[in-house]
Image (cartoon, helix red, strand yellow):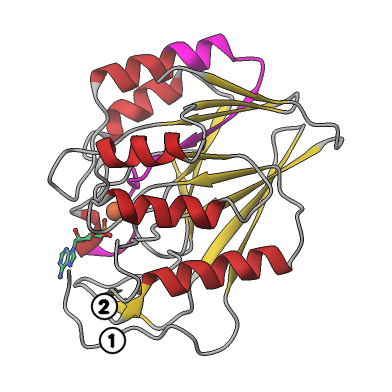
């Protein structure tokens, strides 16, 4: 859990992180989620990333990587990641089955590290907000204490906090019932660490960039189905699958871009009412 990955970089002042999230893969190659073949959309995203060239230093996968809890689904994830030439770290989402996830990642030699020293200036920490069997999230006392201790230990670095569940209202009522339930406890920890100003989530399948009492919360498109922003009830969006880049600068600033597949591809079944 606490193993540390050090990624020394010779590229000067900027570090680039690629976020892939909510792949919702299945064991079967023909399975779909809300009408989208999640394996094909994941592979299309990876191809699009590869076509843009290798200009990222670290891949972060922020949960809900498998939909059916199977080892084979995680193998599909790892096979895809193996096509990209950068190290990958990951955390679980509400749908993930950690025994299969841990084994499949280890079998593919994808790092178990939940802390990354990224270049000279950045510290990345990956939290586990999963509550077994339910869609909402919570950080255990252990996770909160570990976060507090780790941020103290690496207080000389800017910190990027990764977790699956959004800690602040997303604007979608139906998704906010599935948010991080003890966000106030996370805020209490972060208040003690002024270098921890940015949080990166998955879970809500949309591009979000908002202020949480002076902190920045980012969430990102899924590689499969998208949810429509600002809706009270479950509503799918017809935007294409996507991913995010974050450029981390040595002065602590961040520039970030969301990319999507081009064209009218992987359209979901807009009449679906949930899963
Ligand atoms: N119609 C619905 N209403 C409320 N929640 C839903 C609905 N359909 C699915 N969900 C849950 O909402 C979650 C949002 O993203 P997840 O992929 O984590 O998993 C989803 C489901 O657990
Ligand atoms: Fe989720």
Bin the neighbour count of mark 2 within 10 Å (Cα to Cα): few under 14, some 14-19, many 20 and up: some
Q: State the image quarter where residue 229 is shown.
A: bottom left
The residue drawn where x is 77% and y is 32% is: 250
The residue drawn where x is 51% and y is 32% is: 111
Horizontally, residue 214 falls left or right of residue 271, namely right
Horizontally, residue 198 falls left or right of residue 141, namely right
Magenta-colored stretch includes residue 151: yes
Closer-to-camera residue (210/59): 59
Measured as percent of width and height from the top left, residue 197 is found at 54, 34
Q: Is residue 179 above or below residue 260?
A: above
For the N terminus, the image quarter is: top left
Closer-to-camera residue (168/5): 5
Disc assigned to residue 269: 1
Measured as percent of width and height from the top left, residue 191 is found at 44, 23
Horizontally, residue 166 falls left or right of residue 177, namely right
Disc assigned to residue 34: 2
Q: Is residue 31 above or below residue 164?
A: below
Camera sees residue 169: no
Say what secondary structure mark 1 lies in: loop
For the C terminus, the image quarter is: bottom left
Measured as percent of width and height from the top left, residue 96 is found at 27, 47
Q: Which residues are magenta?
A: 149-173
Horizontally, residue 200 falls left or right of residue 70, namely right
Magenta-colored stretch includes residue 107: no
The residue drawn where x is 55% and y is 19% is: 4
Count numbered badges in the picture. Answer: 2
Camera sees residue 242: yes
| Marks 2,1: beta carbons within 8 A | yes
The residue drawn where x is 85% and y is 32% is: 10
| Residue sticking out furthest to the left | 133
């Amino acid at each position: 859990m606490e193993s540390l990955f050090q990624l020394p970089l010779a590229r000067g002042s900027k570090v680039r992180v690629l976020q892939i999230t909510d792949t919702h893969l299945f064991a079967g190659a023909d399975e779909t989620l809300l009408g989208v073949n999640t394996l094909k959309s994941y592979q299309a995203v990876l191809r699009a990333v590869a076509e843009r060239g290798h200009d990222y230093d670290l891949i972060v996968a922020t949960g809900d990587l498998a939909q059916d809890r199977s080892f084979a689904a995680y193998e599909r994830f790892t096979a895809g990641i193996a096509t990209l030439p950068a190290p990958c770290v990951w955390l679980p989402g509400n749908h993930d089955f950690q025994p299969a996830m841990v084994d499949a990642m280890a079998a593919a030699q994808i790092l178990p590290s939940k802390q990354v020293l990224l270049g000279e200036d950045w510290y990345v920490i990956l939290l586990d907000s999963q509550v077994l069997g339910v869609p909402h999230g919570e950080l255990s006392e252990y996770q909160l204490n570990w976060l507090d201790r780790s941020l103290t230990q690496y207080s000389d670095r800017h910190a990027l906090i990764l977790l699956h569940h959004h800690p602040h209202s997303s604007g979608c009522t139906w998704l906010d019932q599935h948010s991080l339930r003890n966000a106030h406890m996370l805020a209490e920890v972060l208040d003690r660490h002024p270098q921890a100003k940015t949080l990166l989530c998955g879970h809500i399948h949309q591009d979000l960039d908002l202020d949480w009492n002076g902190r920045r919360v980012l969430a990102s498109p899924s590689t499969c189905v998208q949810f429509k922003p600002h809706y009270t009830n479950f509503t799918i969006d017809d935007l294409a699958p996507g991913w995010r880049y974050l450029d981390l600068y040595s002065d602590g600033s961040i520039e970030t871009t969301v990319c999507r597949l081009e064209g009218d591809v992987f359209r979901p079944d807009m009449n679906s009412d949930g899963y």
